[in-house]
Image (tube, rainbow, N blue to C red):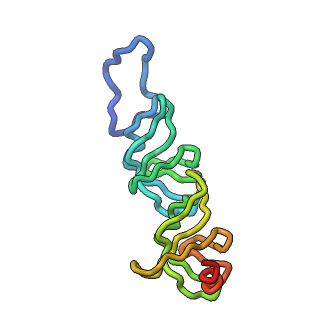
Amino acid sequence: MKLSTDIKKPRRILSTKVNDIEHMDFFSRYIGKKVFSQSGEKVGVVKDLIFEKGVHKGFLLTKNLFIDKEYFNKEFDEAMMLQIEPVTSIIGKLVFDVDGKKIGKVKDIERTNHGNDYKALLVKKTIFSKPKIIEKKNVDVTKKNVLLKVSVDQVIKKQ
């Protein structure tokens, strides 16, 4: 990798092991890069790189979201692309049943683990309404909105 244009090549190197840093990677080249999901939706901006025992594990983005480096696919000058749609991006989306009736907005997700999967959505119509728990098996599509395979009545009857 070439040196970033805003980092000047040092005139002097003080090392017995390194003679040239031109092909080394710099943290600063990642900080501030925008991160996009597989579909092109902005997920956040890189705030920091996370290491464990000297090994790079992933990136800390805005909104305190950590994404493992294994989920990254491509890198460009000012952005990075994921090879996934992060499950956390479902939060805040509107939910409609199979008949087109608005159920509410996703307030949280019940996850199976720290991977990119979930068990259920927690959906509320208003701030004071009782949350509806919608199991993943009832979810049909999660793109711009969340569409269910069943009617709202079928979801409510089970709770």
Report whether 27 appears left or right of 153.
Answer: left
Q: Looking at this view, is 71 or 27 the one in front?
A: 71
* Residue 152, placed above or below residue 86: below
In the displayed image of the protein, which residue is found farthest to the top?
16
Report whether 36 appears left or right of 15.
Answer: right
Q: In which quarter of the image is the C terminus?
A: bottom right
Q: Looking at this view, is 61 or 13 the one in front?
A: 61
Within the image, what quadrant is residue 150 found in?
bottom right
Percent position (x, y) of residue 154?
A: 65, 83
Report whether 112 appears left or right of 88.
Answer: right
At x 31%, y 21%, the residue is 11
At x 40%, y 80%, the residue is 128
* Residue 121, placed above or below residue 128: above
At x 61%, y 58%, the residue is 117
Percent position (x, y) of residue 69?
A: 54, 43
* Residue 52, placed above or below residue 134: above
At x 33%, y 39%, the residue is 6
Report whether 89 appears left or right of 159.
Answer: left
Percent position (x, y) of residue 116?
A: 59, 55
Q: Looking at this view, is 110 or 85 the one in front?
A: 110
Percent position (x, y) of residue 131?
A: 49, 76
How many marks the image carries: the answer is: 0
